[in-house]
Amino acid sequence: MEAAFIQGTAGRLFTVVHPPAQGAARGCVLFVPPFAEEMNKSRRMVNLQARRLAAAGYAAMIPDPFGTGDSEGDFGEATWDIWLDDLDRCLDVLRQRWNAPLVLWGLRTGCLLISDFLQRHESLRPQATLLWQPVTQGERFLVQFLRLRMASGMMGGTKETTGALKARLDAGEDLEIAGYRLSPSLARSLGEAQLSPPKSGAIIWLEVLPGGMDELPAISQKCLTEWTGQGAVVVTGTVPGDPFWTTHDICEVPALLDRTQRYLDEVA
């Protein structure tokens, strides 16, 4: 494992790279993290998967987006476009070191960033796109994020609504939510983001579900139906486990690690 800072669009970015265990890389994997605290909750699982990828011959990079983790900047200064620009920089650094097929790997809202990134770079042809628990609609996620503030306010005797909070954002006001300063710009871009199918390469869609459930949620099935109608071929799978990106205690889902490696080995 190698930790280093690279120059991003608005400041230095902290990155962790897991080089291939032996020989030349069979692929370059760029991880795109989820939003706010979900990134911190998921670090354990992401690093476990990156180690497995390295052992299987991949080079994997895990960046902290601008304004998060150990990267420079404040979360309130981050914008969707800065994060997209920084993905360009991360990809450049990976490819300067390893000339190998690209795998884009996203978790939650990171999958939305991947969609916008691929739309920005139509000539980019990843060998595979790996989607972990993808958020299909940015607006839906934004509402859920705003509800964290509403829940906190209710405990303190303050009643707020999503409509009122959105109006404040629309008026140009930053909002403090669960320890993160959400800017109107980032909220607007997040709310507009939609998950769209990559135009090339294998697509792997994996979700973690509570024990006893094995069918993808209705919102995921709806999205996949739209994708297949557009001609996309998607490999889907579910594994039992806890939602490691939100659990209070850091947890692991070994079945997700196993399934991810198996599916990647089949398509890469």
Image: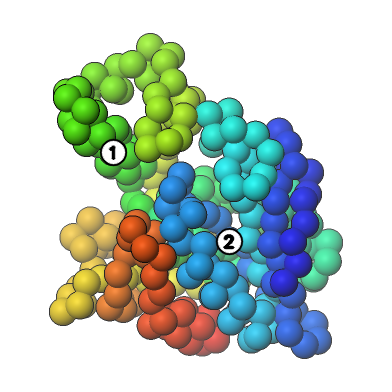
Q: Position of residue 198 (x, y in %)?
A: 49, 59
For residue 105, above or below residue 161: below
State the residue at coordinates (58%, 43%).
Answer: 68
Report the quarter where the N terminus lies.
bottom right
Disc number lying in front (1 or 2) = 1
Residue that label 2 marks: 31
Kind of residue indicated by mark 2: Phe
Residue 38 visible in the shown view: yes
State the residue at coordinates (78%, 49%).
Answer: 6
For residue 245, above or below residue 77: below
Q: Secondary structure at mark 1?
A: helix
Q: Quadrant of residue 59?
A: bottom right
Q: Position of residue 164 (x, y in %)?
A: 24, 19
Kind of residue indicated by mark 1: Leu
Q: Position of residue 97 (x, y in %)?
A: 83, 66
Q: Position of residue 215 (x, y in %)?
A: 20, 73
In the displayed image of the protein, which residue is found farthest to the top? 171
- Compared across the picture, whether 123 is left or right of 228 comes to right
Q: Secondary structure at mark 2?
A: strand
State the residue at coordinates (32%, 39%).
Answer: 145
Residue that label 1 marks: 148
Mark 2 surroundings: few (<14), some (14-19) or many (≥20) residues within 10 A: many
